[in-house]
Amino acid sequence: MLVAVTAGPGGGGALRPLRPDGQPAGPVEQLPDLAGGVATRTGTTDAAGPGGGPATDADAQRGPGVTGGPPRWLWAATGAIYPGLLRAGVRVDRCHDVELTEALLLGHAGRWGEPRSLAAAYARLTGAPVPPDPPTHTAEPPGHGQPALFDDLPAAARVADPLDALCRVYADQQRRVAATERPDRFRLLVAAESAGALVAAEMGATGLPWRADRHDALLTELLGPPSPVGGQPRRLAELSARIAAAFGVRQLHADSPAEVLRAFARAGISLPNTRAWVLRGVDHPAVPLLIQYKELHRIWTAHGWAWRDAWVRDGRFRPEYVPGGVVSGRWATRGGGALQIPKVVRRAAVADPGWTFVVADAAQLEPRVLAAMSGDRRLATAAAAGDLYAALAHDAFGGDRDKAKVALLGAMYGQTGGAAVPALAVLRRNYPVAFEYVEAAARTGESGGLVRSWLGRTCPAAGTVGLADPGVGEPAGDPTPVEPPGAGARARGRFTRNFVIQATAAEWALILLATVRQALAGTAAELVFFQHDEVVVHCPAAQADDVVATLEQCARRATAMLFGDTPVRVPLDVAVVDCYADAA
């Protein structure tokens, strides 16, 4: 059953049942208590667990709007309505996110970056002027202050009859999905993207267990006590003074790249920038001090006392994830640095008493994705092994694992010079189908064309930079190559050859999240953190073995859902730990 829902003022709203094609299947119902109305129809609350994921069963493969089972909720944007439901203790099983779907469809049509809100989609559908998307960056961490149950939408996101607009845009999206080259795959992409939005909101609401006392202790250990007047902590101040002395000056702001570059220039050393990899090639007594200073300064500014006060509440770190926030489909966050937490800071992430963390990381995901999507049987056979590079080495590289790894990564990332040349020749000779797959993607990019992931996510046009959401503040260290303005054809080719693999890997991760969410429904275990290819579950210690088995089963299911019958497998590196830092 598909149910369209919109939020109104004062915690109220409206809903309407729909047929799978988006046509009305019943009258509009006005609700004074939207959360209560959704809970009644869903039958799912916090106490009952997170519910199933829409990208985990046969219904998902048929796409949004299927009949049977719990309702699939149709709404404009998960981030605008679901956090309010969660604050009211209501969780849903499935949804269709119009905004995320619109972004996918626009990208597929070669119109990446156009406004994707419900108002914009409705304007395009009706021939009206298309409004820009409203700003989405939040000025403060979610949950601070006293938020309304459902925050009011900015003027640019409003339409006269939002429920009617929602239904009409959904029906139009269904027609556009059906017109794609592989609608079966694209429907799975839409379902997975929408499921990811539910997971993201739920993890933000649940939070990662975080010990403020341990955080304070490790900061004091690393940085010294904080300044009583708001300046740098003691250790940074001492390092700054030592750096200045090494340059023979009385004072130097070590966090100012311009000042540091001028100091090196006075010493007769010309540098392009002050990045750590550049500094490591310089012979000067200030260099080790500067590298140490940069590492500690980043911890202080990104995950120091101010960060803890802003983002840790009630013993939990609660990030605000942005599904699809990067061009590859990987996630970003709005503040909080969730996807860039240094290992040393993770020492503060400690499981509750009697509980533990199960941390699962997909092993060698991207090369395995290449093996599956390219259809190279010989590479797929190697990707059935626990260590793909070792299997390649045994099969074609005379047992040299390092050479096998250089060759495969070189092919995926466009590293075609130097020591990679002879290794790539071996790869091309023994795995020609996989080699040609990435080469074709590179040629398409070099000629100005667009490439797609396995499910149909489309890369931006040449010269497009930035994130899928202009309001996102943290791209999360996503390793997708960023194509600079005016980049040449070869740079574009490197971008597109990696895009097809990394975007497909992001799809695998989304499906994994959805299957884990469904598998944990009704249990005490909590899905609390996600970073690229790594999933963290917080569970009672006595359930850890069951959770490990569940995660491994979900990984197999994700591979089968994405690629069908393939010998490729994606093993998980799993750790059961009481402290998150111990998993690495």
Image (cartoon, rainbow, N blue to C red):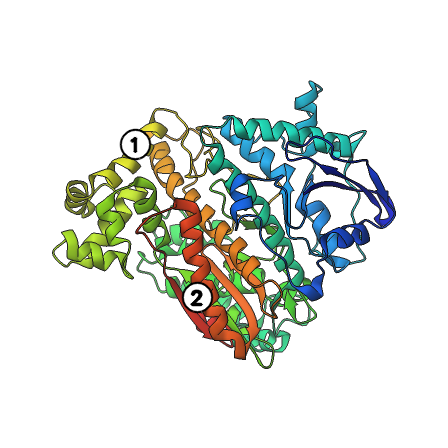
Disc 1 versus disc 2: nearer the observer: 1
Residue at the spot of label 1: 440
- Residue 292, disc: 2
Quarter of the figure with residue 557: bottom left
Element under label 1? helix
Q: Which label's residue is closer to the chain start, 1 or 2?
A: 2
- Identified at 49% across, 40% down, the residue is 327
User: Of the residues shown, which amino acid type is indicated by label 2?
Assistant: Gln
Total tally of numbered discs in the picture:
2
Instruction: Between residue 58 and residue 557, name the one nearer to us.
Output: 58
Give the answer, above or below, for where 471 lies relative to 353.
above
Instruction: Between residue 413 and residue 274, name the one nearer to us.
Output: 413
Residue 253 appears in the picture as rendered? no
Residue farthest bottom in this picture: 354
Q: Position of residue 255 (x, y in %)?
A: 52, 57
Element under label 2? helix
Q: Position of residue 346 (x, y in %)?
A: 52, 69
